[in-house]
Image (tube, rainbow, N blue to C red):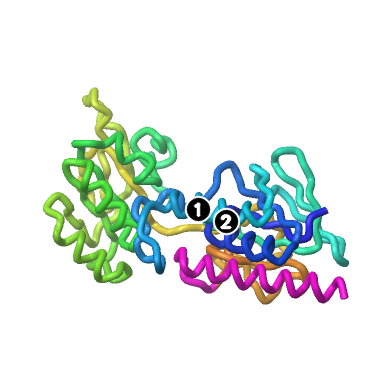
Amino acid sequence: MYDIIILGSGPAGLTAAIYAARANKKTLIIAGDTIGGQTSEIANLENFPGYMGSGMDWIQSTLKQATGFGAKIAYASATDIKWDGNFTYTIQCDNGKTYTCPAVIMATGARARRLEIDGARELMGNGVSYCATCDGFFYSGKRVLVIGGGNSALNDALYLADLAKSVQIIYRKSAFTRAEAIVRDRVAARENIEPVFNTELKSIRKKSDSESGELIATTTDGREIVCDGIFVAIGHEANTDYLTEEIKRDDMGRVMADDLPRGMFVAGDEKSGIKMQVATAVGTGCSAAMDAIAYLNTKDN
């Protein structure tokens, strides 16, 4: 049995692991298939205090810190959590193993919200992508669309602008009001980025006479935009499918922290009511770990 099990290996989970392990609690990180979550996909993490570099480099450094204090890692994902109503949580994972603990910190983060229009599902991985830093290389010198209007969409556009011939940002509103001013200014300064406002896509299909894999994106007002790839950045949904209906969640699937059973804590993008930022995730990871440590110390006494 572990003292604290942490679900997730993004900024919140790894920060929680550092605090838990430093407090001499037997700590396990159930990390998922890979370390880092969405942060590992950030090409240039520049708004985290005291650090500027790739998200993956920051994740690897933080992971080394956590394991250096004794935290263990299981490369698996939770599929079910059961609580005995007393002091034991039983966590079933997709690696066939079961782990137990008296305190669990949920920090599984969020995933990109899928584009629900005709053709989007069928073309995912074949022209439609949800990760610019993962797939941008394949569109060097080509024409791409970015769907969305927040920081994520604009940062994806900036990243792609260094690779692609042209980038059009398709956004349903009349201005990028959700994005930070510095990001908006950078987009405006790029000659190969074109915002297309007051526009939504209705469908995506392969161009029938194209041997190069070109796509036709049809807008809700009937226009057709020819491009080589589409990158979607329209928000996120929490990775909370493993939880039962008794755990209250908001409309994004994020956990309501005030209604959790004792010994269960939540941090990062999985937590309702917080800004989805690396700095925020680190803070909530710290807080959740300290609350879990205090809970264990009170239980032991």
Q: Residue at x 61, y 60 (%)?
A: 107
Report the amino acid beneath label 1: Ser
Chief secondary structure of the magenta portion: helix
Give the extent of the magenta segment: 273-301
Q: Position of residue 284 (x, y in %)?
A: 57, 70
Q: Residue at x 72, y 69 (%)?
A: 292
Q: Which mark is residue 212?
A: none
Quick check: 203 left or right of 273? left
Q: Measured from the top left, where is residue 280 in percent x and y?
A: 49, 69
Residue 73 in magenta?
Answer: no
Query: Which residue sits at x=21%, y=41%?
Result: 164
Q: Disc number at residue 61?
A: 1
Find the distance from the CA under tag 1 to the CA under tag 2.
6 Å
Which of the 4 image quadrants contains residue 86?
bottom right
Proximity of marks 1 and 2: CB atoms separated by less than 8 Å: yes
Give the quarter of the figure containing the C terminus: bottom right
The residue that disc 2 covers is 65
Count of labels shown? 2
Check if residue 296 falls in the magenta segment. yes
Is 30 drawn above or below residue 291 in the view shown?
above
* Residue 166 appears in view: yes
Q: Residues within 10 Å of mark 2 (few under 14, many from 20)?
A: some
Q: Quadrant of residue 246?
A: bottom right
